[in-house]
Image (tube, grey):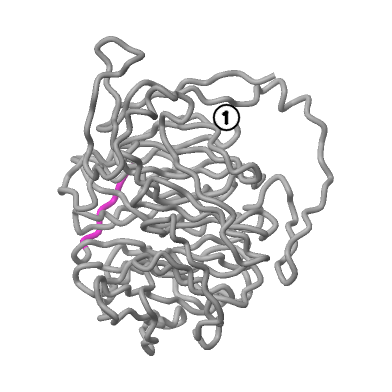
Amino acid sequence: MRTPLVIATAGLCLGLAITMPLRAASDAASAPATTAIIQTVPGMAPVPDPKNLYSETAAGKFSPAVAGALPRIYVPNHMAHTVSVIDPATLKVTHTFKVGLYPQHVVPSWDLKTLYVANNAENSDKGSLTVVDPLTSQPGKTIPVDDPYNMYWSPDGKYAIVVAEAHKRLDFRDAATKQVAFSIQTPDCAGINHADFSIDGRFALFTCEFNGAITKIDLVNRKVLGTIQLSQYFNRPEALAKLQPGLKTPKFVPDPAQIGGQICVTPGMPQDVRASPDGKTFYVADMMADGVHVVDGESFKQTGFVKTGVGAHGLYPSRDGKLLYVANRGSNYVHGKPLGKGSVSVIDFATGRVIKTWPIPGGGSPDMGGVSADGKHLWLSGRYDDVVYRIDTGSGAVDFIKVGKQPHGLAVWPQPGRYNLGHTGNLR
């Protein structure tokens, strides 16, 4: 039995509420317990709990690899070409250092021993990675790397996966030397940027920001398995027919299914991706659709859509793996304005429902970040407001810390977990 769920939240580019099929609580209770063992790809660590791939990232489960790491928040200031370092105990910036051109994200290494600042040097060939020592919070050498908008790691830790956004390409580089071993072209994925991985490491899903799509990469056979369009109207053919490819700003037309209603005909702008605890579904934030798409990983089909808030962008699971925090950036525009309708929505993984939403007091632009090691706070950059937000995950109360111009993919470090799959901390 499956029950329909209709979820609606106000936003700039919203139409009718979308029906999302979910398993009823009674069905979940009667489902037989599973003892299945996940067969991971060679070299990948085992999955202790098939029902919760986040089981090893619970509070207190630190790897010996992070022993001695200073508790710090690393904030790449995109337009200042710097990184601000915050002491979470004092909420003060301890120091700021220069990095390469246009830093985008701070990425912990697969083995958790090093941090890398991904400087993609927009519209030039001067991209680089700045090495940071988490034991001292100081920068080290700079490694020339072509267009590192973002960076992930193969599940076995052998390769750094540099997301060369401008080239529609994934460069698999030797994790130690950073030399290119092989590349996978993604011609149908314009603006390839964020990703998450299957529970067994066989495939990954990467979002395509500039053409409203998501692409599936076979990591074993090193090829693209397919690319599909995502839409808040995924189950409404009459609305899908009215979408206008190429639009970059919100545009509305009358809704054919509702007198006086409107639909947004601008294609989506998929951003961050995060797997459900059981690894079966993937949640995909969409900055234009103001919500989160739900995609079945194996069939690679969209199965739902959850409306959250304006400019849905970053996705972060709670330490117990029960909740998903959605950072709503407050704008549908790549270059937004300060003090927007920024907020954080909280989705219950078990039901797929938004159970609460915390607005940023006075307005703001929560973007990307991570959850504190103890799970008590969510740290997010304020992209258009030159601040960092520390959000209490119990009450939603917000603290503000001033940083540099256009902070982006900040990293909270150290975090619990055995290894990192990439981005600002996708640990398992």
Say if residue 72 shows up in the picture. no
Q: Residue at x 65, y 25 (%)?
A: 23
Q: Is residue 400 magenta?
A: yes
Amino acid on which the number 1 mark rests in the picture:
Thr
Q: Residues within 10 Å of mark 1 (few under 14, many from 20)?
A: few
Seen as rendered, the residue at the extreme top is: 259
Q: Is residue 310 left or right of residue 114?
A: left
Q: Is residue 246 left or right of residue 109?
A: left
Q: Is residue 351 left or right of residue 168?
A: right
As displayed, is residue 359 above or below residue 103? above
Displayed quadrant of residue 150: bottom left
Q: Residue at x 62, y 70 (%)?
A: 63
Q: Residue at x 19, y 49 (%)?
A: 336
Say if residue 417 shows up in the picture. yes
Query: Residue 266: percent from the left, percent from the top?
Result: 29, 37
As displayed, is residue 216 above or below residue 152? above
From the viewer's side, name the closer residue of 112 and 70: 112
Q: Quadrant of the N terminus?
A: top right
**Residue on which the image places disc 1:** 351
Q: Quadrant of the C terminus?
A: bottom right
From the viewer's side, name the closer residue of 25 and 213: 213
Query: Residue 4: percent from the left, percent from the top?
Result: 56, 19
Query: Residue 111: percent from the left, percent from the top?
Result: 59, 75
* Stretch of the chain drawn in magenta: 397-402
